[in-house]
Amino acid sequence: MSARLHTMPSSPAARRSRNVSFLRTFRLSLRFIVPLAVALGLFAYAVVPLVDRLMFGWAIRDIEARTQLIAGALDEQIGDAARDGAIGRISRALERATHDERLYALAYCDAEGRLLVRTRQFPAGFDCTTRHADPAQLADARPGSIEALHVVQRPVMSDGETLGALVLVHDTSYVLRRSEETRRYVVMLVAGMGAIVALITVLVAHLSWRGWVEGARAFLRGEGLVRPFERTDPDIAPLVSDMRQLLRQVNEERRILHDTTIEWRPETLRLLLREHLYGDQVIVVSNREPYIHSRNDDGRIVVKRPASGLVTAVEPVMRACSGTWIAHGSGSADADVTDKQGHVAVPPDNPSYTLRRLWLSEEEERGYYFGFANEGLWPLCHIAHVRPIFREADWEQYLAVNKRFADAVVAEARTRDPVVLVQDYHFALLPRLIRERLPQATIITFWHIPWPNPESFGICPWRTEILEGLLGSTILGFHTPYHCQNFLQAVDRFLEARITREDSVVTFHGRRTKVQDYPISIHWEALSPEQRQAAVMARERLRASYGFGPEHRFALGVDRLDYTKGIVERFHAVEAMLAKHPEMVGRFTLVQIAAPTRSVLDDYRNFEQRVREQAARINERFAAPGRPEAIRLLVEQHGSESVFAHFRACDICLVTSLHDGMNLVSKEFIAARDDEQGVLILSQFAGAAGELTEALIVNPYHVDQTADVLYQAATMHPAEQGERMRSLRGIVEDFNIYRWAGRMLLDASRERNSAKTRDRIDRLSSSSERY
């Protein structure tokens, strides 16, 4: 695969890879070296005081011996001089004796303890009562200080009579200097030994690891550790083949995932699917269909793309991979264009995959979709302060519809191990239902909305069934690491499952599910010169249709009419901004495209009424005769071309979600602005805020802050707009929808091949135990 992927020279990336490899090896070595250094440091800390005590003990004994020799040599001379009263002779004898470099001073005291004679260096504070210091005190003295002097007295005898005493003062500075040198030698010795031991150990470990790796490679090549196998054991041969394939795949996957020079395009995804999943059939399951066939007023059938982030993200993937998309047929003419099995080829202008439609009764749709999914799970997963409603009847319909979709997946599967992409909260039970009937299927489930914390999730009466259903997946994806952690904590609290947090894997009833964050994105396609010119003309026509002059600031909001999107909070921010900056009245307009949704539910009908009332009130407050209104509210569906034209024409795009999984409106706006102009204002509670850091991030609940940022965007210099937009476009281009899908497919491939290898090992172990 590597030879066919489009790459660019990447020597800096290669150098970074080598640096990362070196740092990883260095960190592994530190796991041994740091404890060794600590142990040797403690050893040195304990040994140095012991060595000091031994040194001083030897020094004091040496001084005592020298004292005996000096006293013996002077005893006769001083005794005779003392008997004769010749003080001068005593003084000269003592001065000659102090020529010994270690003998600091001498003194002579008579029998009554009076100091009669002393040498020139005899300390002034010493007398005949001074005794030698304790060796422990000498150890703390400074070389050359008075505390470093050691005093010894010896009696002067003559014919058995004590005539006086000889006071000998020794300078122990040499002992202190020798002790310091010894300390240094001990520390250097310990450090040297530690370095040698660490070097030898790391070297041996490295060589041992290389030897093990080479042995494993030899084993995988069919060779023994000593000589080649003459014949591969039939039981081991499949395991060896699987391990070889797994190692090759892991190496290739690591290269693909970390190589930022790979261009993620439809061709890349198709190649990846063919080589890593062996061209397996791809089946997508979602509630929302990618194309809706409806009849207009004159009876003609028209095709529309629904306003759905899910469809925006997944539809390009299906175009690249082909396969079958199973969805609820909701259009008034959907049944008129399908065959007996509910199949229709799409897209209409260039068919590349099959859409399989399922028809739901009014009762099923009311209980499964409007009831459990959107009155229960939707508010449960979004922090928007709307109370979730759970009904037994809704749950039963939710379960029944999930079973119907599982039947459709099994019916559409041409093999035992298709790749099934389950989309969103409408099908929390589907992965397990598919797993029970297609045990070898690779099931990738992506949860497009936030996952709540365990306390919030715990109020759901069927929390256990939902968790068990999702754990039928091979891969379970969320937008952010925070949502992954919330899910793992919910599993930990409500199920008996083993969680390996290092790998983010849940093992439940013997089956593994990898839980990982995969930030979703959009299809990225550069405009041709003709398209770019057409976009410029469309921008001018659109602004003219709204009555906006060149200096008029045009802000845009594109959302479903949903209480989680922060539309009312957005209106309040516009109101606050105009109140703070009256000069903007009549020169600023927010065009709010609000696609109607779930209008059969009371919460949504009430929300629509509230939105309309707030827009009317604000427009009345800031009415400027002959000038555009402050808010133009468009409660209607807009096609993708119309939305693109609005993205190109506006000066500011407002995404003020109160809580959102990702929000692809922000990324669609960025993709549309190849003129590198326009400002994105983005809620901190949208998953996209973690990626699009060059946007102006706001807290939509903080109305004044959002108003200030809105004014900042309206007055931002074009140069700053260009700098921010270039950075944002680079992020969206690099991390496009094909990279998102590729990451999930690669992880699924790895999990599937790992499972095969584990099964081989288990069978081999069972076989060996029988013998």
Image: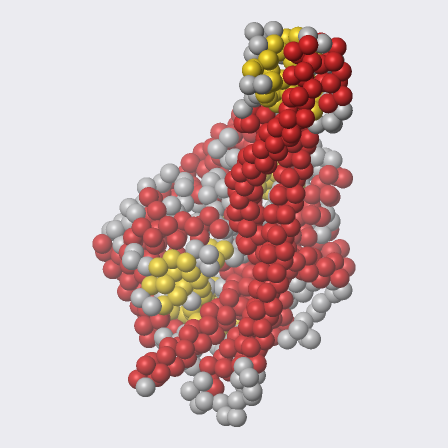
Identify the image quadrant of residue 263.
bottom right
Colour basis: secondary structure
Q: Nearer the viewer, residue 505 or 735?
A: 505
Query: Residue 69 vs residue 564: left or right?
Result: right
Identify the image quadrant of residue 180.
top right
Vertical relation: 133 (above or below) 215: above
Vertical relation: 411 (above or below) 568: below
* Residue sitting at x 61%, y 32%: 65
Query: Residue 270 vs residue 760: left or right?
Result: right
> Residue 438, position in %: x, y?
36, 76
Considering every residue shown, the one lying at the far front of the view is 159
Q: Is residue 732 visible?
A: no
Q: Is residue 134 visible?
A: yes
Q: Nearer the viewer, residue 248 or 434?
A: 248
* Residue sitting at x 37%, y 50%: 489
Vertical relation: 93 (above or below) 749: above
* Residue sitting at x 73%, y 27%: 100
Q: Nearer the viewer, residue 665 or 88?
A: 88
Is the N terminus in the top left, top right, bottom left or bottom right quadrant? bottom right
Considering every residue shown, the one lying at the far bottom of the view is 230
> Residue 19, position in %: x, y?
68, 57
Vertical relation: 528 (above or below) 347: above
Q: How many marks?
A: 0
Query: Residue 427 vs residue 724: left or right?
Result: left
Identify the image quadrant of residue 421.
bottom left
> Residue 20, position in %: x, y?
65, 57
> Residue 627, position in %: x, y?
64, 31
* Residue sitting at x 74%, y 35%: 717
Is the C terminus in the top left, top right, bottom left or bottom right quadrant? bottom left
Query: Residue 135 vs residue 10: left or right?
Result: left
